[in-house]
Amino acid sequence: MSFEQVTLDRVRDYWNDRPCNIRHSTQPVGTKEYFDEVEARKYLVEPHIPAFADFERWRGKKVLEIGCGIGTDTINFARHGAQVTTVDLSDKSMALARQRSGVFGLQDRIRFCPGNAEELSTFVPVEPYDLIYSFGVIHHTPRPDAVLDQLRQYTYPGVPFGTTVKIMVYYKWSWKVGWIVASEGHGKFWKLDDLVARSSEAQTGCPITYTYGRKSGKALLERHGFKVTNVEVDHIFPYRIRDYVQYRYVREPYFAWMPPALFRALEKRAGWHLCLTAIA
């Protein structure tokens, strides 16, 4: 079965079963302590996110976020003074994100819109935004091109540099893809799409995970009228899983010996995250 044939119900059920990052803390779910620990762990493991999102830049601006998850980036856009409209397919993820906004007193800065981003204009009023942001989301929907087609309607028409678009999708030529094919697929590279989908997330069995190269990622945006201004690869997860799930940060032996500069160079060539910045 191709990814386009996967139903949205399967995708929704997968993310409702275990919302992304929900196990980033041992504190009671929904408390301030829980959300603080979730954020600290997320940005410890993925320290490139704040620089990519550039939260401070959007103070006083309108941000449209596709895929809020449990709201870590959402809260930081609002905390830095943006007015955020956020979308997610998973009602359980969005419920936690909404609760989070109340815990931090930011509910007046965030509009929550549950639904399928492939049909965005049917439930989010069409109006222009200063930033359209999506981190690690549209590669999990059956038709990413449909999402990009919808997003075009939320840009400032005819205004140079009016709307910035920042999207992260997974990088096909990454260390992680190579590791998945070698260790999980025993070298069966012809099954790459299915292998990567099954092992792309903390909970195995993700129904859909598209991956992109630099050229195909750029083309994804440009065929919908966006002009890509920057393409960067980043992020290799270096920790031993058996320790990480116990909240211990022990690097795999083959990363532990690497000088920081060498590891950083490897991330910039073979990272898991393909970070695309464009203008409308």
Image (cartoon, grey):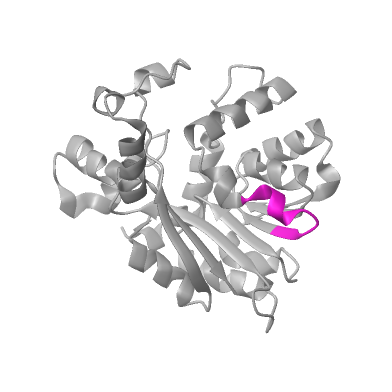
Specify the quadrant that holds the N terminus. bottom left
**The one of 46 and 195 positioned closer to us in this rendering:** 46
Residue 179, position as x, y percentages in the image: 24, 39
**The one of 258 and 235 positioned closer to us in this rendering:** 258
Specify whether residue 31 is in view.
no
Query: Image point 36% across, 32% down: which residue?
Result: 260
Residue 55 in magenta? yes
Q: What range is drawn magenta here?
A: 54-63
143 w.r.t. 21: above or below: below
Picture quarter containing residue 41? top right
257 w.r.t. 101: above or below: above
**The one of 146 and 27 positioned closer to us in this rendering:** 27
Query: Image point 64% across, 39% down: which residue?
Result: 72
Query: Image point 82% across, 41% down: which residue?
Result: 106
Residue 174, position as x, y percentages in the image: 30, 48
Picture quarter containing residue 122? bottom right
